[in-house]
Image (cartoon, rainbow, N blue to C red):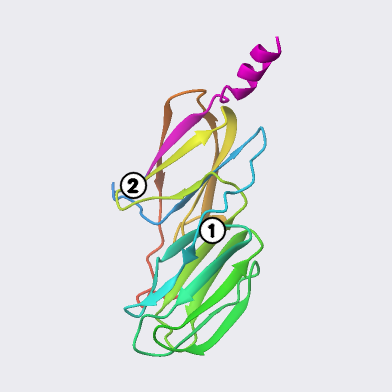
Amino acid sequence: MALIAGLLAATPAAAGDLAVSLKTAAGKPVADAVVMVSPQSGSAAPRAGGPYRMAQQGMRFSPFVLIVPVGADVAFPNFDPVLHHVYSFSAPKPFELKLYGRDQTRHVRFDKAGVVAVGCNIHDAMSGFIRVVDTPYAVKTDAAGAALLTGLPPGGARLTVWHPYLKAARNETVQAVTILAAGTGRQALVVELRTPPKRHGSY
């Protein structure tokens, strides 16, 4: 009996996947959207992962959108031949990294979930976004507007989609979904985006 109980305990719990497709009404794929799932059964702690970085390169922040778990340390290396002054006024993590030059790096720890809009105090055209998440089930859509979340607990869940230019309250949309006990469920969403700022600035 003890052996049987041990084998049962070692059997992996049922889990399903969710494939999400995100497009505009015109059929254009939406890249750089953060797709998150919060199971009704309760979400596990976010995976540590890493290392995480948002570089300054080509007078842009790269990546434009970065997903990190609560408690993550993010590196901000400067690969440009000019000085940058990186900052954020966002409530989850206001910070300031004063002037630093090429091949220098600064670090910031993000200890609260939410959206952090990042800018450069010297170059107003630069902007990026960090989505700090408290769930391990968070991915970013690719150039085709596709995202795949794996290993989800089966049952009811909340699907949240966020994008910096999404036309919705808090730039996100939320809906109920059902995660399959095995296999891949599919969710196709149509969203409307605001026109990005001409200077690619913060919102």
Residue 8 badge? none
**In the image, is 161 to the left or to the right of 81?**
right
Does the segment drawn in magenta span residue 9? yes
Q: Secondary structure at mark 1?
A: strand
Q: Is residue 108 left or right of residue 166?
A: right
Is residue 26 in the magenta section? no
Q: Is residue 6 above or below residue 187?
A: above
Identify which amino acid the numbered label 2 is placed on. Answer: Ala
Q: Which of 196/8 is in front?
A: 8
Exactly how many numbered labels are in the figure?
A: 2
Q: Is residue 118 above or below residue 171?
A: below
Image x and y of residue 5, in percent: 68, 15
Magenta part of the protein: which range? 1-21
**124 lies above or below 46:** below
Badge 2 crowding class, 10 Å Cα cut-off, few under 14, some 14 to 19, many 20 or more, is few
Quadrant for the N terminus in the image: top right
The residue where tag 2 is placed is: 25
Report the Cα–Cα distance between label 2 and label 1. Answer: 29 Å
Task: Give whichever of 108, 85 is nearer the camera.
Answer: 108
Q: Position of residue 138 (x, y in %)?
A: 51, 48
Q: Quadrant of residue 113?
A: bottom right
**Element under disc 2:** loop
**Extreme front residue here?**
3
The image position of residue 142, as x and y in percent, is 34, 51
The residue at 63%/75% (across/down) is 94
Q: Label 1 sits on what residue type?
A: Val
Mark drawn on residue 68: 1
Residue at 51%, 64% in the rendered image: 130
